[in-house]
Image (cartoon, rainbow, N blue to C red):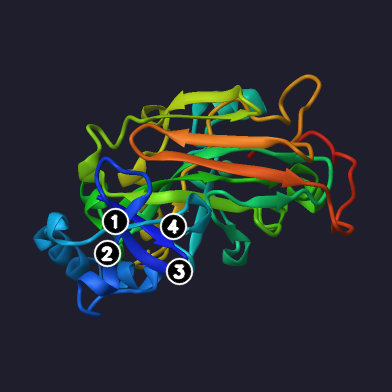
Amino acid sequence: MRLANVGGRATIVVPGSDDRGVDVAEASGGELGPDPQDVYESWDAFEAFAADLDLTAEAPATFDQADLRAPVPAPRQVFGIGLNYRSHAAESGVDVPAVPATFTKFPASITGPFAEVELPNGTVDWEVELVVVIGRRADRVAAASGWSHVAGLTVGQDLSDRTLQFAAGGQFSLGKSHRGFTPFGPWVVTPDELDDPDDLALGCSIDGETVQDARTADLVFGVSQLVAELSAVVPLLPGDIIFTGTPAGVGFTRQPPRYLQPGETLDSWIEGIGTIRTRFSAPAGAGLVGGEQAGRPDAG
Ligand code: ZN
């Protein structure tokens, strides 16, 4: 099943369609939704409702792509994992960490799957990532049962201001949380929709030129392991999200480095989930840290 946020309302996308959906609140007689975030708080009830739902008996409404918002609009916790693909650790010139290298993207940086994002300076980089959505509270969960706490998967970009990220000994959380730096969507796909949710092709392109192309099977800490490792420290709550890390092909490790420019379009996709599209505009105001790149980065 694919669960979208259409104009602020939880919507089940009709199988085989990209623009028709059933409103969860209407179809459940007001038991669930309409706020998409509330659906994750009631994931067991939602799954039972969805299993019984006869989509052919409903009257799906057509929606515009432009009305799709972030499918998880207000998570209480947003985890980001750095250096979680060997290929990206290698291009960054560092070893794969023994524990997940974890930061946060502050929730107010979340934006939708077809958003325009302002570039605060000339050193903003791309990072396509598989994003995990928690459906059931996870507290000290074993890796073997990690997946049972996952509601679904979606496509994200961990946009990163490399200047701020590497300033003052490392400002990962702030440097990845400028306005609009956390686009994801276009919907959440439940794991049962995927042949192998641990092995999905993912990539992204700038104005049609592919810059990242990999598979999630190459994750150092896979989905179930991340649920275990993180929940050993802090409980994961329904509606939390995890950006699982990016593969090789980012801009700052290139010679010369390449960064996103105003007017460029970034398409990011994951097999079996979908594609998000982010457009970039020129800075409207001065950033916290100005354009010059601050030294040799060591992670991302
Ligand atoms: Zn990342």
Element marked by disc 4: strand
Asked whether residue 64 appears in the rendered view, the answer is yes
* C-alpha distance separating marks 2 and 3: 22 Å
Give left or right: position of 81 versus 297. left
Element marked by disc 3: loop
Q: Nearer the viewer, mark 1 or mark 2?
A: 1
**Residue type marked 4:** Ile
Q: Position of residue 184 (x, y in %)?
A: 50, 50
- Mark carried by residue 136: 2
* C-alpha distance separating marks 4 and 2: 12 Å
* C-alpha distance separating marks 4 and 1: 10 Å
Give left or right: position of 56 versus 30. left
Give the residue pinned by disc 1.
Answer: 151
Residues marked 2 and 3 touching at CB (< 8 Å):
no
Give the residue pinned by disc 4.
Answer: 241
**Residue type marked 2:** Arg
Element marked by disc 2: loop
Residues marked 1 and 2 touching at CB (< 8 Å):
yes
**Residue type marked 1:** Ala
**Residue type marked 3:** Gly
Quarter of the rendering occupied by the C terminus: top right
Q: Nearer the viewer, mark 2 or mark 3?
A: 3
Q: Residue at x 73, y 31 (%)?
A: 252
If you read the primary sequence from the N terminus, does the residue marked by circle 1 or circle 3 appear first?
3
Give left or right: position of 283 versus 64. right
If you read the primary sequence from the N terminus, does the residue marked by circle 4 or circle 3 appear first?
3
Q: Residues within 10 Å of mark 3 (few under 14, many from 20)?
A: some
* C-alpha distance separating marks 4 and 3: 18 Å
Give the residue pinned by disc 3.
Answer: 8
Q: Position of residue 279 (x, y in %)?
A: 67, 43
Q: Position of residue 3 (x, y in %)?
A: 32, 56
